[in-house]
Image: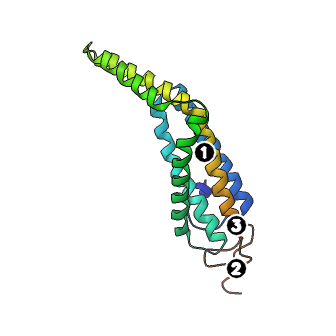
């Protein structure tokens, strides 16, 4: 668990990739659940932001770099995600504007009934429908962003021996009194 919670220390490339794959699978499962069970489950994905940051900080530490470079990786991921969010849904035939207009028309129809429960139920169903339509483009976008960030991270090579962030993974700490 320390792998995902504490930014202190170093991790090697293979440990980094195991962590990335684990977090990607968790993110994918949460996306599927939020699309088919409840859109509110998507909020659970906020929990994995910290573990993603921790993995990258530790990987930078292994390369002898400051973990603050992770901010650049976050910016890169956001920009790439935004670009892909414009391209991928259209490639899969998802017309978000039409779906949102349909949702607004349905909400206007429901508002005439003055039944708040029915309005909430209708908005939840419309949200699930939109999430289901966006599921495949969203998963593909996450996979592409993960791959690009992983490639960039592979450009940072491990430093041999101890550095200011600790000893290399698998190496016993140095005896201070030796």
Q: Which residue is mark 2?
A: 174
In the depicted view, which residue is nearer to us: 81 or 123? 81
Relative image position of residue 111 (x, y in whole percent): 27, 18
Question: What residue is shown at x 56% (from left), y 59% (from top)?
Answer: 54
Q: Examine the image and state in which quarter residue 56 appears.
A: bottom right
Q: Classify 150 as above or below 172.
A: above
Q: Mark 2 and mark 1: span between their CA atoms?
A: 40 Å
Q: Give neighbour class at mark 1: few <14, some 14-19, many 20+ (Cα, 10 Å).
A: some
Mark linked to residue 142:
1
In the depicted view, which residue is nearer to us: 146 or 175? 146
Relative image position of residue 139 (x, y in whole percent): 61, 39
Relative image position of residue 46 (x, y in whole percent): 48, 46
Q: Which residue is mark 3?
A: 155
Relative image position of residue 33 (x, y in whole percent): 55, 30
Question: What residue is shown at x 71% (from left), y 87% (from top)?
Answer: 178
Q: Are marks 1 and 3 in contact (CB under 8 Å)?
A: no
Question: What residue is shown at x 28% (from left), y 15% (from top)?
Answer: 115
Q: Give neighbour class at mark 3: few <14, some 14-19, many 20+ (Cα, 10 Å).
A: few
N-terminal-most mark, 1 or 3: 1
How is the protein colored in the picture? rainbow
């Amino acid at each position: 668990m320390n792998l995902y919670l504490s930014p202190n220390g170093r991790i090697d490339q293979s440990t980094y990739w195991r962590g990335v794959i684990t977090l990607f699978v968790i993110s994918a499962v949460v996306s599927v659940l939020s699309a088919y069970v409840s859109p509110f489950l998507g909020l659970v994905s906020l929990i994995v932001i910290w573990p993603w940051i921790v993995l990258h900080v530790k990987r930078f530490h292994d390369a002898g770099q400051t973990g603050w470079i992770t901010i650049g990786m976050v910016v890169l991921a956001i920009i790439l995600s935004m670009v892909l969010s414009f391209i991928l849904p259209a490639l899969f035939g998802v017309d978000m504007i039409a779906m949102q207009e349909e949702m607004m028309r349905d909400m206007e129809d429901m508002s005439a009934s003055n039944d708040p429960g029915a309005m909430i139920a209708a908005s939840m169903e419309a949200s699930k429908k939109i999430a289901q339509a966006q599921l495949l483009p969203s998963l593909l976008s996450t996979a592409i962003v993960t791959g690009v960030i992983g490639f960039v991270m592979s450009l940072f090579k491990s430093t041999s021996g101890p550095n200011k962030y600790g000893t290399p993974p698998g190496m016993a700490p140095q005896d201070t009194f030796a």
